Amino acid sequence: MKVLVFGAAGIVGRATFAEAERRGWTVTGLSRGACDVTDAAAVATAVAAARPDLVINCAAFTRVDLCESEPEAARLANGVAPGLLAEACARSGARLVHLSTDYVFDGTARRPYLEDDPTGPRSVYGATKLEGERRALAVDGSLVVRTSWIFGAGGPNFVDTMRARMAPGAEPLRVVDDQTGAPTWAPFLARALADLGESGAAGIVHYQNRDTVTWYGFAREIARQLGTTVEIRPVTTAEVPRPAPRPAWSVLDVERFERLAGRRVEDWRAGLAEHLNTSGER
Ligand SMILES: NC(=O)c1ccc[n+]([C@@H]2O[C@H](COP(=O)([O-])OP(=O)(O)OC[C@H]3O[C@@H](n4cnc5c(N)ncnc54)[C@H](OP(=O)(O)O)[C@@H]3O)[C@@H](O)[C@H]2O)c1
């Protein structure tokens, strides 16, 4: 299998590149410096040169709050670029696997979101990611993988932020307890992306790790695994206002993935243990 990874320097990009190498695939990874995915000519040249079977797009404007003040930049990277990638794939006979997010939903559900549930993004990030899904899926054979709450090496993430704040003598932490989701360890996600890429699945697939938890519960498990006694206080979303609204409910139904892959999704606690053991470096 010949694979081309865009956004290869990000958290998911790095893990995906490593997973492809582990499988013995021929893999090329392009960071933003090597290819800006908003540049149609650069995307076309990169795909034509690599002649991949599979393109995995891990590039995105992921700073959710910044998207609110830079909507045009967010739209180009998250909304327009996936269409450029899908068209380049169509011309080269490659299949596109594109990453999306729970933020395409309004977060008001009380059961896991199915792939075909109505969307309703409440932030610029969510709206631009939804546009990206539509543009990617406009080309037959494209696959969109929606995921959530990613942690891993290679970029800012909740686990590393919490770990830094849990140093001995740290002030009590205040962590939101009214947003529920499921953490996802990047190397587990990378394995899922590779499996799905190999399977030829198209359309939308939801993938996140099990089980569901709030950010507060997640922080408590991080503290437990680190063996720290730092005080963690539950707070409400309203107590920590942010520029972009966060979904209260980020739970995705992963049944379609489990059917396609023939296995259950992994437990994030196992990924957390590995991440903490390797000091976040992989
Ligand atoms: N992190 C999460 O919790 C989460 C949850 C659900 C879905 N996702 C989705 O998962 C995917 C991967 O996210 P991630 O967590 O790996 O994010 P990340 O660590 O921020 O990686 C994204 C990468 O894309 C690059 N990039 C940004 N704009 C680009 C452009 N115009 N051209 C080329 N590269 C560009 C970034 O480079 P710079 O750093 O130089 O900007 C960065 O290396 C994204 O589609 C994201 O929307 C993430």
Image (spheres, rainbow, N blue to C red):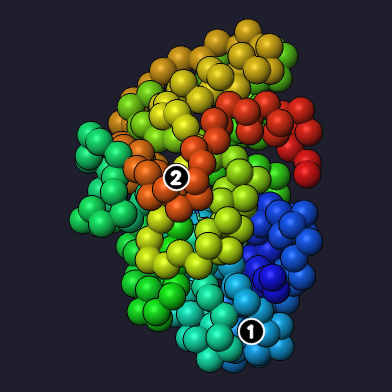
Residue at horizontal 65 percent and vertical 89 percent from the top: 48
* In the depicted structure, whether residue 146 falls above or below residue 215: below
Q: Which residue is mark 1?
A: 47
**SS at badge 2:** helix
Question: In front: 45, or 96?
Answer: 96
Observer able to see residue 70: no
In which quadrant of the rendered view does residue 40 lie?
bottom right
**Mark 2 residue CB less than 8 A from any atom of ligand 1:** no
59 left or right, relative to 233: right
* In the depicted structure, whether residue 69 falls above or below residue 26: above
Query: Residue 20's spot in the image, x, y percent?
Result: 71, 60
Residue situated furthest front in the rendering: 262
Residue at horizontal 68 percent and vertical 63 percent from the top: 8
**SS at badge 1:** helix
CA neighbours of label 2 inside 10 A, class few (<14), some (14 to 19), many (20+): some
Q: Which residue is mark 2?
A: 258
